[in-house]
Image (spheres, rainbow, N blue to C red):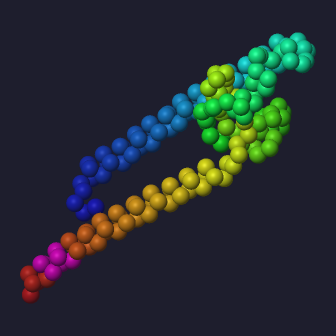
Amino acid sequence: MEYCSTKQISTFVLALIGFSILVFFIEEYTEESEMQSEMEMKKAFYNKEHSNGGITGGTAQKATEYPAEECWKHEQFEVVTQCAPCKDFEIKAIKAAHCLKTGYFDRVTCSKSATTVLRPCASPKESRRKEFYLFTMINAFILVISYMIMIERKTQLDRAVYMRLPQHF
């Protein structure tokens, strides 16, 4: 800090503020696009439920012998969103089947039927556990690097003190 000028520190602080604002806008954009895709899926579900006109049985289904909502049980699939938390509206008002079991869901795209469906997340704690371990490892790495920089800086300052000491006598 003693080698940094006020101009450099203020530039650094302004850069941090600018970066924080940038992260905020990126987060808002991602959240908005996620909400749009959720609304499209809800509209498709609503249209599918109301377009049947009360028809029951196998006539409302496609050529497969299983429901489209369970395509992930019978086909290859790709996980689009992993273990996302359900909203209170989905749990309490809609009572969505994919939210009732665990309160978390996966958004998957089935490859054969090319449909995107929601399924209950098997274990939301597993994904959080991985994130926690990654966070811990990054912090440990930063700790080691910071400690090495601190030791180097301390030796530089000690050398400077030892060099000034003979000048005072």
Q: Is residue 127 above or below residue 169?
A: above
Give left or right: position of 45 versus 153: right
The residue lying toward the viewer, choosing from 91 and 11, is: 91
Residue 68 position (above or below residue 131): above
Quick one: 57 or 40, which is closer to the camera?
57
Q: Horizontal placement of 116 versus 99: left or right? A: left
What residue appears at the point 88 percent right and 12 percent down from the top-left corner? Answer: 53
Magenta part, dominant SS: helix
Q: Which residues are magenta?
A: 158-164
Q: Position of residue 55 (x, y in %)?
A: 90, 14
Residue 22 in which image quadrant: top left
Residue 81 horizontal/vertical position (percent)? 61, 36
Question: Residue 109: x, y in percent?
Answer: 63, 28
161 falls in the magenta region: yes
At horizontal 82% and vertical 31% (from top left) the residue drawn is 94
Say if residue 89 shows up in the picture: no
Question: Which residue: 55% across, 32% down?
Answer: 30
- Residue extending farthest bottom: 169
Quadrant position of the N terminus in the picture = bottom left
